[in-house]
Image: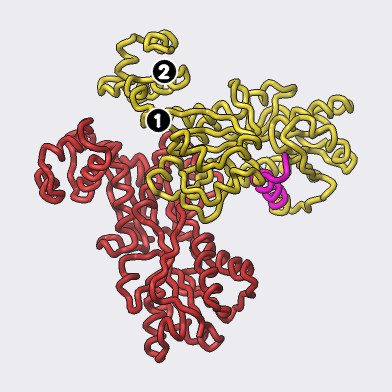
Chain colours: A yellow, B red
Amino acid sequence: MTTIKDIANRLGIAVSTVSKGLNGAPDISEDLRQLVLDTAVEMGYKTKKMRKEEHKKLVIFVENMDYEGPDDFGHDLILGFQQMAYRDNWEVKVVPVNSHTQSREKYNTYMLKHGYSGAFAMGFALQDNWMKQIKTTDVPTALLDNYVPLNPHVGYVGTDSYEGIGLAVKRLVDLGHKKIAFLNGSPNSMVSDQRQEAYENSLKDNGLTPDPALTAYGYYVADSARFHVPGMLEAGATAIMCGNDLIASGVLEVCKEKGLKVPEDISVIGFDDVPLAKELTPPLTTIRQDRIELGKCAYFTLNSLMHKVSISKTMLRPQFIERESTANVK
Amino acid sequence: MTTIKDIANRLGIAVSTVSKGLNGAPDISEDLRQLVLDTAVEMGYKTKKMRKEEHKKLVIFVENMDYEGPDDFGHDLILGFQQMAYRDNWEVKVVPVNSHTQSREKYNTYMLKHGYSGAFAMGFALQDNWMKQIKTTDVPTALLDNYVPLNPHVGYVGTDSYEGIGLAVKRLVDLGHKKIAFLNGSPNSMVSDQRQEAYENSLKDNGLTPDPALTAYGYYVADSARFHVPGMLEAGATAIMCGNDLIASGVLEVCKEKGLKVPEDISVIGFDDVPLAKELTPPLTTIRQDRIELGKCAYFTLNSLMHKVSISKTMLRPQFIERESTANVK
């Protein structure tokens, strides 16, 4: 079990200072207090008060998403959520689910049985059993990248794909690209549909006409590239935008195999800015979602729903991160 | 100046209990603590700490909007914002502005000169000088019902008009209405455009075709009705939806003058649910925006922006409030 001393060692400060941070003493700065709390969450430290209040429990459900390592997409989302929830003395369980979990038990009864006051659900697909049940649930639920109309107990949290894709297309057009392809992630996902629409509208905003030969839905994995990139190259693509960084890493691989240089012969842009992105060769230009902040927004949304404030959407602005996988058209 | 005793008298509790609430003592309930804080804000009470920290200042700018009385649209928006800001020891100034204020001084220099750390701007029109400057400001700013693309220092707060209008149209269709008119508020307003689009899309979702004779932009005042309602009635309207409750009150008036009974001859629906709505004859069916909650969302958005979390949008769900101004089509 993590102790106050462990936190003090990690931060290189006195045990008494950590204690002040955890207890909200007025004679340390707000910034230091936040740092102590954030580190405590990261290291799994629990205050006496938290150990007593074992009934105050929230859950993060994770499906179709890796989260255990710091490089995984879900990792920082969970961390950001926990950092905020910790301040309000919530215990947060992380529970991976699959279609089996969802067919074995109804969403509402699962929540009730385990005594969870609310949930943050990440990575669910539209056709999931629980997604259907969440449409009418009265259990406060924040959804990552999924929107449920009309239900006042459910809120949506996500990054504004429209702005991110718009920035990327604009930059490619400024670099002289006219044949801009888009290799999307999985169908049956609201966020894929948003990005598809954003891509097509951004082309039009820049005077370009979407070409069906330059766009495809794949899956959110690197191997998507192997199947779709050859056709896009054949159709004349000089730039390929991707549904996420993993897909982009596959595109870089396929281009290399075909003897094409990135960015000299072809530009490639990812989405998310997972830690992998800057380690690729070349370092990947991408659209950043700040996952720590997104996790914090999820807690804010859930906390509001638990207080009967029906937030339907909270959206975060993306950032366009230009590294070395984009250049002027040849 | 409001004292602790004034708050105790208002709530009918002991002075010591108020003191506990203000100081976050652990032996009173969270609900009571919130009530004490909310009442303190409402009565203008300032803690010693707040009086000391006079440099911690936020501003609420108000344009084109009444806010002084509890019946005014802006009143509860300000109250909700202040209730949240108070918890973080911010002083909040409310400053009415007009085009003269905006031409006399630039937005950024105004903010700097007065030492404001952030602003919540309500009621601004798209063509306002300051709105143009807010597009590129680096001062954290939350905007009610106005969206600025790409600027990471500015966030939008609003109610989801699409859902509200959708609920109202669906209910009218269920009551047998096919000639559903929409008397909108002012042009040059993002929220008017949203509601217009929502109205047209909702008609289509219900198998109806928008008819230009049944829709018009007016202004957000009762007198709009006098000019536009006659034409809508002539075009066969059996129901009139309105851009806000004030416009709806004008529609009720005009119908009465023409010898039409509401809801027997014609149904009328407002937007906002200001206190006036339930006092009208007949009590008005309307789409409710919870302005206290919207004010709280504005503070959350601004607070996030001040902490470098770029929230682009926070949206609240509306509620459909059915009173006595809607009925089956004749």
Counting residues from the N terminus, which is met first, the one under dot 2 or under dot 1?
2
**Which residue is disc 2 drawn over?**
A45
Residue A90: numbered disc: 1
**Residue A166 makes an appearance in the image:** no
Q: Answer whether labels 2 and 1 touch (C-beta < 8 Å).
A: no
- The answer to whether B252 is drawn above or below residue A308 in the figure is below
Q: Is there one chain holding both mark 2 and mark 1? A: yes
Which residues lie in the magenta part? A185-202
Q: CA distance from mark 2 to mark 1?
A: 13 Å
Disc 1: which chain?
A: A
Q: Is residue A183 magenta?
A: no
Q: What residue is shown at x 33% (from left), y 24% (from top)?
A: A52
Q: Is residue B102 left or right of residue A235?
A: left
Q: B305 or B126: nearer the eye? A: B305
Looking at the rendered structure, the kind of residue marked 1 is Trp
Q: B103 or B35: nearer the eye? A: B35
Looking at the rendered structure, the kind of residue marked 2 is Tyr
